[in-house]
Amino acid sequence: MDADAGFDARLHGDDVAFGARDAALLRAIDDAGSLNAASERLGRSYSRAHERLGALEDAFGPLVERTRGGPSGGGTTLTEEARTLLARFERLRTGYAATAETTAAVLDGTVTERTGELGVVDTDAGEIRALVPPDADRVEVSVRADAVTLHDPDATPTADATSARNRFEGVVTAVESGDAVARVVVDVGADTPLDALLTTDSVERLAVEPGRRVVASFKATATRATPTET
């Protein structure tokens, strides 16, 4: 299992993930009326755009209709399946943004090391690497749910294989699913649990459920500490 959270929202179909670049390609086709013109507008090669469109159609069904000749000169238009897919993607991105704005774990701690803007904060969950203020020792570390990635404990990347520097093993205690986005609560042995955002498709595909052991990881550069008010 490797479940990425964040604003890089994706819809999964078979082994293909539909993301922001794919949505931009479909919108450009809709605006320009052809794959060739859409590719030029996006600064992508036609061959790669054509290949990607084929992969998307294999996973999600027919996304464009092509006409040749005639009074209008032919062109390419989006199918209803494509418009439905775009609508689903927009709902997903909106759900991520709305949930991420209000979902974050906040842990109290003490700054024990500093290296430039980054530091180590000792919390009841353990040491957390974060962006720290220059003149404060007592801080609150905020870990946004959209920055947390979940891994299977047996398949967690090693420290030198990923830029995510904070890792905490824990147990899923709750899964709160909306229409497109699920909030996964992970007990990492602290007073405050960590939250992660997954698509509901990913929750089902990866069998994320209460009682499952996971490793939650998040980048130091996505983790901010602020001075504790006195």
Image: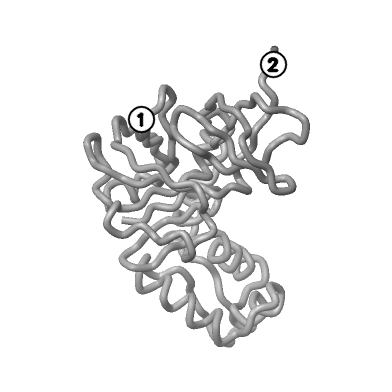
Q: Residue at x 70, y 25 (%)?
A: 227
Which element type, helix, strand or loop, lies under badge 2?
loop
The N terminus sits in image quarter: bottom left
**Which quarter of the image is occupied by the C terminus?**
top right
Q: Which mark is residue 29?
A: none
Q: Which residue is mark 1?
A: 189
Check the image and name the residue furthest to the front.
Answer: 112
- Crowd class of label 2 (few under 14; some 14 to 19; many from 20; radius 10 Å): few
Residue 41 position, x and y percent, is 71, 74
Q: Residues within 10 Å of mark 1 (few under 14, many from 20)?
A: some
Q: Residue 160: x and y, percent?
A: 49, 64
Q: Amino acid at mark 1?
A: Gly
What's the residue type where badge 2 is placed? Glu
Q: Is residue 110 left or right of residue 65?
A: right
Residue 212, picture quadrant: top left
In-image side of 61 versus 131 (left or right): left
Q: Which residue is mark 2?
A: 229
